[in-house]
Image (tube, helix red, strand yellow):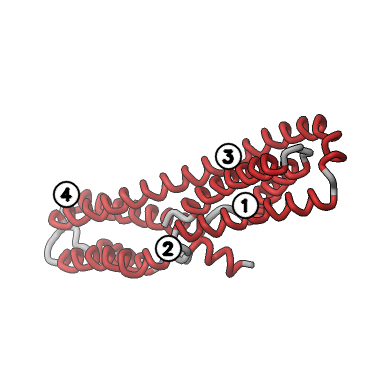
Amino acid sequence: MMDFVNFLYGAPIWQMACIISSISVGGTVSAVLMVDRVWKKDRRRSHNGIAGFFIAVVGVIYAILISSLAITVMTRKDRAETLVFEEADKVARLAREVTTLPEPNRAAMPAHLATDVQVVIEEEWPQSSRAERPVAATRVLHRLWLDAAALPLKDLADVLTVKDFRKHIDDLYDLHRGRSDLAINGVDRIVWAVVLLGSISMIAFAVLFGVENFTAHLLMSCLLSFSIALAMMMIVAIDWPY
């Protein structure tokens, strides 16, 4: 099961959309055909009044749940983009501030910053796309911090300059840690279980309605399941922002 979920998250968006919509609509068609065979519409029609009331209540609860989940993953995506921009800006600021550090010990600083950028691009981004915690840049930042701590401080100006430089390294640590956390934390399995069960409940209510026109009943049920599948596609597409 987890292999299928990992495949779904790693697949291209169009492929993921086709799989989710096919499962949702195909399951709905099968359910409508099966229910119509074993429970005739004439007997189901007598329950339409109470079923309509229940589906309205369940629909409101499900709408609140799915919208809350969508807002949560969209907020995480915006946070992930913000962290990337801030991290890049912090690296650029450190590269500019290197020129203000005391000589001659600052010589290795630009190389550490260049290595950090290279490691993030070549190692950490692929790890993040696989939902693995990236750690390579942390080691590079640690060496940078040690070099900054070893800088000679001749006067108050050097003390203040190095202090600001080390603070920005600490800020870069925090940004990296936030990006790493977002790379491995998606929607919890319990939340997905509740959403899936809610989706099945909504489709089940639609399937159990007694509608005289079978084609219209099938079409409406499939449109409902496809609408739910669209929401699922959006959540899966932006759940893992990296």
Mark 1 sits on what residue?
25
Q: Nearer the viewer, residue 28 or 143?
A: 28
**Amino acid type, callout 2:** Ser
The residue shown at (51%, 61%) is 9
Q: Name the residue under label 2.
A: 128
Question: Where is residue 165 drawn, in percent x and y?
Answer: 25, 53
Q: What residue type is labelled 1?
A: Val
Give the mark nearer the N terminus: 2 vs 3: 3
Q: Pointer 1 and pointer 3: residues touching (CB < 8 Å)?
A: no
Earlier in the chain: of badge 3 and badge 4, it is 3
Q: Label 1's element? A: helix
**Residue bearing the label numbered 3:** 68
Marks 1 and 2 in Cβ contact (< 8 Å): no
Residue behind mark 4: 157
3D distance between C-alphas at marks 1 and 2: 32 Å
* Marks 1 and 3, how far apart at CA: 24 Å
Q: Is mark 2 on a helix, strand or loop?
A: helix
Q: In this view, does 98 lie to the left or right of 217?
A: left
- Classify mark 3: residues with Cα within 10 Å, few (<14), some (14-19) or many (20+): few
Total residue callouts: 4
Relative side of 2 to 87, left or right: right
**Residue 181 vs residue 233, the one in the foreground:** 233
Q: Residue at x 74, y 52 (%)?
A: 33
- Local packing at callout 4 (Cα closer than 10 Å; few below 14, some 14-19, many 20+) is few
CA–CA distance in space, label 2 to label 3: 25 Å
Which sits earlier in the primary sequence, circle 1 or circle 4?
1
**Disc 2 and disc 3 in contact, CB within 8 angstroms:** no
Which badge, 2 or 4, comes first in the chain's sequence?
2
Residue 231 in the image: above or below residue 134? above
**Among the two numbered marks 1 and 2 on one chain, the one whose residue lies closer to the N terminus:** 1
Q: How crowded is mark 2: few (under 14 residues within 10 Å), some or many (20 or more)?
A: many
